[in-house]
Amino acid sequence: MFTMASPMRSLALGSRALSRLFTRVLPRGDVTLAARRDISFKLDEKTAHSSLDLFKKDTAIIYRMLGIDPSKIPQNPERFREWAIVLGDAQIVSGRHYWEVTVKRSNEFRIGVADADMSRDECIGVSNRSWVFAYCHSKWFVMQDSKKFPITNIGHPSKVGLLLDYEGQRLNLVDSEKNTLIHTLNADFRGPVVPAFALWDGELLTHSGLDVPENL
């Protein structure tokens, strides 16, 4: 059996919002999703770490502390090797897109987007090619490039929304009940990005194929 280590706890809290970060990246190849308002995706088993099981027709994940022996699962370069991460199977290169995540059955996770070709040896939120909102120790944080600071106006929702504005270079955390913005993370999208999820406790359930709320 394989034991998955917990993520590093030593990231320092920032004192102000993350500024836009720039890095050089190469152009990407073909993508699978053009500009649409109703992104629909499944979780891509080929990317899932061995400690994560997919269920509900590949729309949900559950964390297993004693994961599958890595030698028992198909090995491919798309699978995350060190961190409990899975990516969505729809690549985004333009437009505004909205999806929701039921989070009430987990005490530690990260949700957001990442470059489709990010390193499978890095963790989302630590990699500079990912943009995420994290929950740990009953607190919410925004994370990018190993920088992290708290979100204080969110409470304890059972479900949240994510609104991606590709041209606007923003990822928004949304109150899915009130359809209001909780926090905006400035991004630096240079190529295809995909929904991204990390999980170290419990389970997450995704809801895609949703229209962007009219007032957002």
Image (cartoon, rainbow, N blue to C red):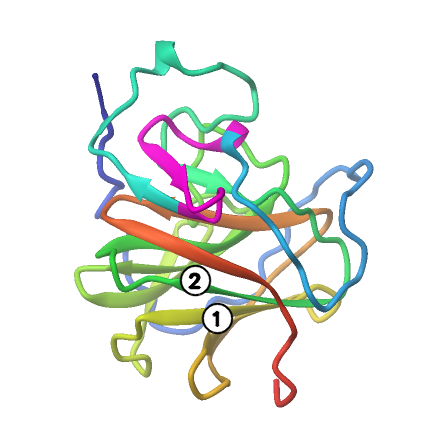
Q: Secondary structure at mark 2?
A: strand
Crowding at dot 1, Cα within 10 Å, few <14 / some 14-19 / many 20+, comes out as many
Q: Give percent across and percent down for residue 21.
A: 58, 58
Kind of residue at badge 1: Gly
53 vs 195, left or right, is: left
Q: Residue 204, relative to residue 19: is it above or below?
A: above
Locate the C terminus and report the quarter of the image it occupies.
Answer: bottom right
Q: Residue at x 21, y 47 (%)?
A: 9
Q: Which residue is mark 1?
A: 161
- Asked if 125 appears above or below 95 in the picture, the reply is above
Give whichever of 155, 191 is nearer the camera: 155
Provide residue 84's location: percent of width, then percent of height: 35, 36
Q: Amino acid at mark 2?
A: Val
Provide the residue span drawn in magenta.
Answer: 46-60
Disc 2 residue crowd, few under 14, some 14–19, many 20+, Cα 10 Å: many
Question: For the view shown, which residue lies furthest in the front direction?
Answer: 57
Q: Does 134 sit above or below residue 91?
A: below
